[in-house]
Amino acid sequence: MSFTQHNKNGLVYDTADGLSAFGGIRHAFTTRLGGVSAAPCDSLNFSESCGDSTQNVLENYRRLGAAAELDMQRAVGCRQIHSDFVRFIRAEDAGKLLHDQRPYDADAMLTDVPGLPLVAYSADCCTILLYDPTCRCVGAIHAGWRGTASGIALKALVAMMSAYGADPMTIHAAIGPSIGACCFETDGDVPSAIRAELSASADRFITKRENGKYHVDLKQVNRLWLLRGGLDPRNVEVHPDCTACHGERYWSHRRMGSARGSQIAVISLVP
Ligand SMILES: [Zn+2]
């Protein structure tokens, strides 16, 4: 299993084969390619935080919706705060992204309501999509290093099981493009936070360099959390791309600073 690239009239996004295999959902991991925004948000940008116009951002959502067959008018997003808060998204939340201020402070969303695209933003941070095709529920997670260290992936998984009766043996997960261990250089605070929760099991994803800095593989740490939740290793896909290495394809905060756009991971049950 791996990822498939789509190019619809120049708009480029990836899907995870393991999620697509079951049908019943639409999903996408976007790139920076195929939108209408001008520099420095050129061109597929989904956030106004870089100073992009509302008009451009709305047009980018419209184009993504047309390309990936997602009803982005009903999309739901949260104000992401690098927390481990999980929100259940209900039918009345439809559209609380484009037409409302994002109503919740949270970094993970779950729903069993069809036709509600859940949106997680990133520009280096991990995004994780969850799908249980048996009990029909989905999730979208934003996990920066703080969320990764505190195990938001596992917390979302447990919430999915308790709220909807999802079964870890039938849940599939995909971790999208994000900064790789090659480029995620940190001080000791990040390894300490991760080891405090995962102890030595995370050591193989943390490398200390001669300059005293650490390199951390956040994607693999999130995968470890999902496996701890009981997911079958065959059902957890990890996108190989590092967002900082591939500035021509992705937004990267590490590479570009705050003068950059945001990509999204989005998933929706098909109505
Ligand atoms: Zn890299």
Image: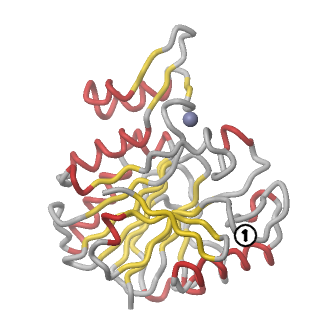
37 up-or-down from 95: above or below: above
Could you say which is closer to the camera, residue 217 or residue 228?
Answer: 217
Could you say which is closer to the camera, residue 15 or residue 112?
Answer: 15
Please identify the residue farthest to the bottom as the structure is shown. Answer: 271
Q: Quadrant of residue 101?
A: bottom right
Look at label 1 and name its amino acid. Answer: Gly
Residue placed at 66% from the left, 58% from the top?
262
- Residue 6 locus on image (x, y percent): 53, 69
Tell me the quadrant of the picture where the N terminus can be found: bottom left
- Residue 37 locus on image (x, y percent): 80, 67
- As helix, strand or loop, the secondary structure at mark 1 comes to loop
137 up-or-down from 182: above or below: below
Answer with left or right where residue 250 lies relative to residue 203: right
Answer with left or right where residue 20 lies relative to residue 251: left
What residue sits right under mark 1 in the picture?
35
Answer with left or right where residue 132 lies relative to residue 230: right
Coloured how? secondary structure
Q: Quadrant of residue 271?
A: bottom left
Answer with left or right where residue 255 lies relative to residue 149: right
How many other residues sit within 10 Å of disc 1, few (<14), some (14-19) or many (≥20)?
many
231 up-or-down from 220: above or below: below
Query: For the residue with label 1, is its CB less than 8 Å from the closest atom of ligand 1?
Result: no
- Residue 129 locus on image (x, y percent): 40, 63
Residue placed at 49% from the left, 40% from the top?
145
Q: Quadrant of residue 71?
A: bottom right
- Residue 270 locus on image (x, y percent): 38, 86
Residue placed at 72% from the left, 78% from the top?
58
Ligand 1 quadrant in view? top right
Please identify the residue farthest to the top as the structure is shown. Answer: 210
Residue placed at 55% from the left, 32% from the top?
184
252 up-or-down from 140: above or below: above
